[in-house]
Image: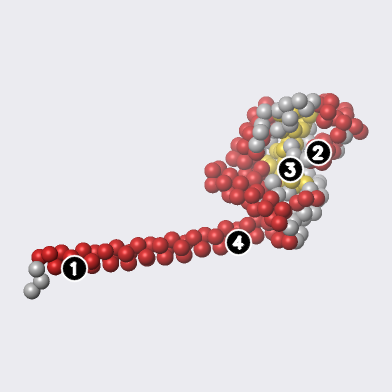
Amino acid sequence: MLSGDSKATKNDAGGRLKLASSLRRKIHFILIALVFGIIALMLGFVWFVERLPTEDATFTQDADGIVVLTGRASRIGDAIELLATRRGKRLLITGVYPTTTATAIARLAPENQHWVSCCVDLDHSAVNTIGNAVQTRIWAKKNDIKSLIVVTSNYHMPRAMTELAHQLPDVVLIPYPIIPDRARVEGWWMNATLARLLFAEYLKYLRAVVRTQTPFVISRPGSV
């Protein structure tokens, strides 16, 4: 017969084996979940990129207002052009530098200086997309905006629309994506710099969706 010490040793060994086996199963499960998570993330990224517009929008729709989220100057010029063709009654340019004035903005579209003088509002306080959305909500409420044309780059549009929809659930949002040369998504997998830009934006978009529970992805083609 085994002594008490021998039985205890055998039980301890058996317990360690069971613990080690359980730990291996947990690690195995975690690794499988991690692999599937990475696959899902990458498939989601490809889906995200493939849904981005590859052509400039063709536009026939009017709205109460227009908002442009600042970035490259071409966005502002396009937004002012929309205003000048009476697609909206007022234009908000959100996230401009503190030192930027309406006069400086007018130089971007000298043929439309009248519209800049009468109907363009500048927001100097927003420093990110969340801030853009908050300031747009304040401006929209002040100006009784019920429908809004949103002007930003194609790759930024899903996150911008997600944040704006969260802040403005009762306002009709109409995307007007701009296609910057550096973000033409055809053949993105062959351009490491573009791929990194798009993947970083995809992660920011996912974070916005999780935080707001308001997903939005613009669809191809880029017509509105």
Query: Of label 2 and label 1, which has the lower sequence position?
Result: 1
Distance between the alpha carbons at the discs numbered 3 and 2: 11 Å
The residue that label 3 is drawn on is 152
Query: Of label 4 and label 3, which has the lower sequence position?
Result: 4
The residue that label 2 is drawn on is 73
> Residue placed at 65% from the left, 48% from the top?
201
Query: Of label 1 and label 3, which has the lower sequence position?
Result: 1
Where 208 sits versus 106, above or below? Answer: below
Residue 26 visible in the current orientation: yes
In the structure shown, which secondary structural element does the residue marked by tag 3 occupy? strand
Task: Tell me the amino acid under the disc marked 3.
Answer: Thr
Q: Mark on residue 10?
A: 1
Distance between the alpha carbons at the discs numbered 2 and 1: 76 Å
Residue 219 image position (x, y, % from top left): 70, 54
Distance between the alpha carbons at the discs numbered 4 and 3: 25 Å
Q: Residues within 10 Å of mark 4 (few under 14, many from 20)?
A: few
Side (left or right) of 144 relative to 88:
left
Where 27 sits versus 214, above or below? Answer: below
Q: Residue furthest bottom?
A: 1
